[in-house]
Image: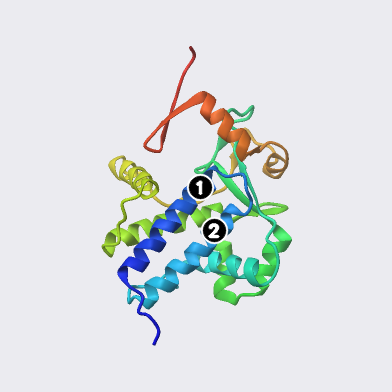
Amino acid sequence: MARVVTKEDCLAEIKRFFKYYAAYCQSPDPDAVREVLASTYSINDKLRKAGYPDFFDSDEFLVIKAIRNHAIHQSEIHNKARALPLASRVPIQADLTILCLIPKDVMVLISEGVGQRGKSAIENSCVYYKNYVDIYPCIFNFGVQLFLYTEKNGLEVNTIEYLEFKSSIDYERKNEYPHHVKGGVELLSGGDVNEFIETSLHSIEERNDLQSLLYSEEDGFFTFKGAN
């Protein structure tokens, strides 16, 4: 007889997601995103089997599921993580500093493997550029959805990664900021955003090195060190 999935099983997977998500945000390894995708899929499976509401109504979950299935069962997604420069020669407006770029032709293949509902979810949740599709807004927004879900369903966990995410949510609540993001990069002085994506983004290693040099971190928040 199959073992019944318990609340403790769900809590373990929730811990795992926030651990992998936090690691991904700091990791230059393209495989780091696969752990986030796999954990997202597993969270929904465990919650459903344990009798909790599932995420099948979430565009973000449907997109992550489609990308995960393609990566597991079809072919590589050839993703790369990039970051906006901490100091830019041109003014930039963006609500996220990290991009998870997948070649557009790969996303076309993924879209062909889903129905119209899935195609609409991809278009609504990701940001399209000339040669790439940024899936990080989708991943970020699912993280927000999952956190709010844990509060609503009594599934909070007491891990460093979860509590750092909670601190960000609490800060947004205090200042009446939105939790979800639209994504995308805008060049405020004009210019070709596609060229900027191709030539001006930093690697995650470069971002981490500059961030460590210029900012101090406490509880997930960064403060500019200023001139010595």
Q: Is residue 162 above or below residue 154?
A: above
How many neighbours does mark 2 have within 10 angstroms: few (below 14), some (14-19), or many (20 or more)?
some
Q: Earlier in the sequence, mark 2 or mark 1?
A: 1
Give how far apart the Cα atoms at labels 2 and 1 are. Answer: 10 Å
Colouring method of the image: rainbow
**Residue 128 image point, x, y percent:** 64, 55
Q: Nearer the viewer, residue 110 or 204?
A: 204
Query: Picture coordinates of residue 201 (x, y %)?
Result: 66, 38
Residue bearing the label numbered 1: 23
Tell me the kind of residue under disc 2: Glu
Between 105 and 124, the residue placed more toward the observer is: 105
**For residue 104, which quarter of the picture?**
bottom right
Q: Is residue 43 visible?
A: yes
Indicate which disc residue 35 carries.
2
The residue sitting at 36% across, 56% down in the picture is 147
Q: Position of residue 19 (x, y in %)?
A: 45, 52
Label 2 secondary element: helix
Mark identifier at residue 133: none
Q: Residue at x 45, y 57 (%)?
A: 17
Comparing 126 with 220, the one in front is: 220
Q: Nearer the viewer, residue 157 or 97?
A: 157
In the picture, residue 78 is in which quadrant? bottom right
Q: Residue at x 40, y 55 (%)?
A: 144
Displayed quadrant of residue 89: top right
Q: Is residue 228 left or right of residue 145?
A: right
Amino acid type, label 1: Ala
